[in-house]
Image (cartoon, grey):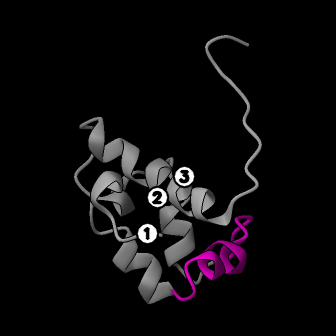
Amino acid sequence: MKPFKRKRIDDEKYLRKLIHYIHYNPIEAGLTNEMEDWKYSSYSALMSNSKTNVSREEVIGLFESQSNFIFCHKAAPLLSAID
């Protein structure tokens, strides 16, 4: 369907940047000031210990640890330390 596109993600670096971009997008759009406040994001599910259908361990594992995941999400995507 237009205007949506599909793109195969076969690069772990790109996947990390994409996850960060998606989590940061509501801030960039001016819809919220904090990622954890946006109820439509998986960010809060990834940060909590509550039961979720989100693949928490897999996503956090892409960033090596929860503390690194949080660190990488502190800055805007273009300025982030994500490699």
| Residue bounds of the magenta highlight | 51-65
Q: CA distance from mark 2 to mark 1?
A: 9 Å
Instruction: Assess whether mark 1 and mark 2 are in contact (beta carbons under 8 angstroms).
Output: yes
Magenta-colored stretch includes residue 61: yes
- Residue type at mark 1 is Ile
Residue, disc 1: 82
Instruction: Assess whether mark 2 and mark 3 are in contact (beta carbons under 8 angstroms).
Output: yes
Front: mark 2 or 1: 1
- Which quadrant of the view contains residue 74? bottom left
- Residue type at mark 2 is His
Horizontal side of residue 4 vs 19, given as left or right: right
Magenta-colored stretch includes residue 59: yes
**Residue drawn at x 38%, y 72% as measured from the top left:** 72
Along the line of sight, the residue nearer the viewer: 79 or 32:
79
**Residue drawn at x 55%, y 78% as measured from the top left:** 63
Residue, disc 3: 18
Q: Quadrant of the N terminus?
A: top right
- Which quadrant of the view contains residue 23? bottom left
**Residue drawn at x 39%, y 51% as measured from the top left:** 38
Q: Where does residue 65 sit, x and y in percent of width and height?
A: 54, 89
Where is 48 relative to 21, above or below?
below
- The reply to whether residue 7 is in sight is yes
Q: Where does residue 6 sit, x and y in percent of width and height?
A: 73, 31
**Residue drawn at x 22%, y 52% as measured from the top left:** 33
Residue 20 got which mark?
2
